[in-house]
Amino acid sequence: MSGEPEVAVVVPTWNSAALLPRLLDSIAAQEGAIELLAVDNGSTDGTVDLLRERGIPHLTLGRNLGFARAVNLGAVRTAAPFVMPLNADTELEPGCVAALAAALAADPGLGGVQPRILQLEGGDRDPDAARLYSAGMALTADGRAVEAGAGEVQSAAWLRPREVFGVCGAACLLRRELFAELGGYDESYVSFYEDVDLNVRARILGRRFAYVPEAIVWHAGNASWQVGFERPGAENARLVARNRIATQAKFMPAAALPRILAVETGALVRAARQGRFLATLRGKLEGLARLRRSLEERRRLAHGGDLTRARTWLGRW
């Protein structure tokens, strides 16, 4: 594509050969110049060969270092003013990148924007009939993150632009200066909840996020993750349990601790019913073991910003 790129698209890949062709085609169909870089996390299924055959710039890591590390490495190796992390199991509708870039450029106070992310189920790609995957990230009263509108039939309420707590890491557009100021995603998270953590830290610094529904992205959801582990659901549960505690410790008020304990106890009960008790318990114990580090980060964030800027979004959809 000709012209000076405004957007750097960073695609972490991991055994994604079956997913990438549609994503790459959808990126090539976008308007304007795009700086594209794939960061491969040690694929063994021909993903790197596919990237070479397509002439896609890529960085090969040799082993899986996680989503957070892959995006950070991609971001520092690109130069466009906006950074767009994209999961390998996504596809972009025409005009998506241009709509996101225009919204971010129009409001200097925005740290990032998110498209309307739709659930990719089977071969049907009707934007009007699909269910939502995410219309922005929200926080429950106990500090857990949820994707607003997830699983719902689209209605007029989800077709209006609005400010949101944060943006989903599967597909979002971030201002490079904010990404650099935050040090990117917290690489200790590896994968899962790194986007929640970045949103929290950005909010504490006073940055805002917006939902841009005219920009549409399809998302299959954890498609690459499913082929990487013998029990991908259990590994997911471990990382979410661990990383959620780390993020809550960074900004939640002490008065919320009884509520958090009740919710986390309930999570263990549900995990037992789903056959993921040990993985979830292990994640919680790992999160508690990292509590000192998280509390040190909390003090640093409070010194440079205001924790209540994130807390005001608790329980708000």
Image (cartoon, rainbow, N blue to C red):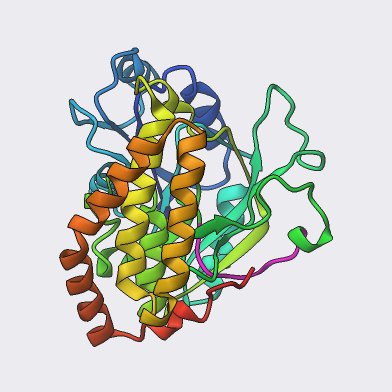
In this image, 176 relative to 31: left or right? left
User: Which quadrant is home to the C terminus?
Assistant: bottom right
On screen, residue 181 above or below 53: below
Q: x and y percent of residue 34 in the render?
A: 44, 45
Q: What's the residue at 41%, 82% (across, down)? A: 255
Q: What's the residue at 36%, 28% (across, down)? A: 56
Residue range in magenta is 159-167
Q: What's the residue at 32%, 42% (across, down)? A: 67
Of residue 78 and residue 268, the one placed in the foreground of this image is 268
Of residue 132 and residue 74, the one placed in the foreground of this image is 132
Q: x and y percent of residue 201 in the render?
A: 34, 71
Q: What's the residue at 36%, 63% (across, down)? A: 198
In this image, 56 relative to 209: left or right? left
Q: x and y percent of residue 169 in the render?
A: 45, 50
Of residue 158 and residue 34, the one placed in the foreground of this image is 158
In this image, 135 relative to 56: left or right? right
- Answer whether residue 106 is visible to the viewer in this image: yes
Q: Is residue 103 magenta?
A: no
Q: Is residue 162 magenta?
A: yes
Give the number of marks: 0
- Answer whether residue 36 is visible to the viewer in this image: no
The part of the image, by quadrant, that contains residue 151 is top right
Q: x and y percent of residue 119 in the render?
A: 65, 38
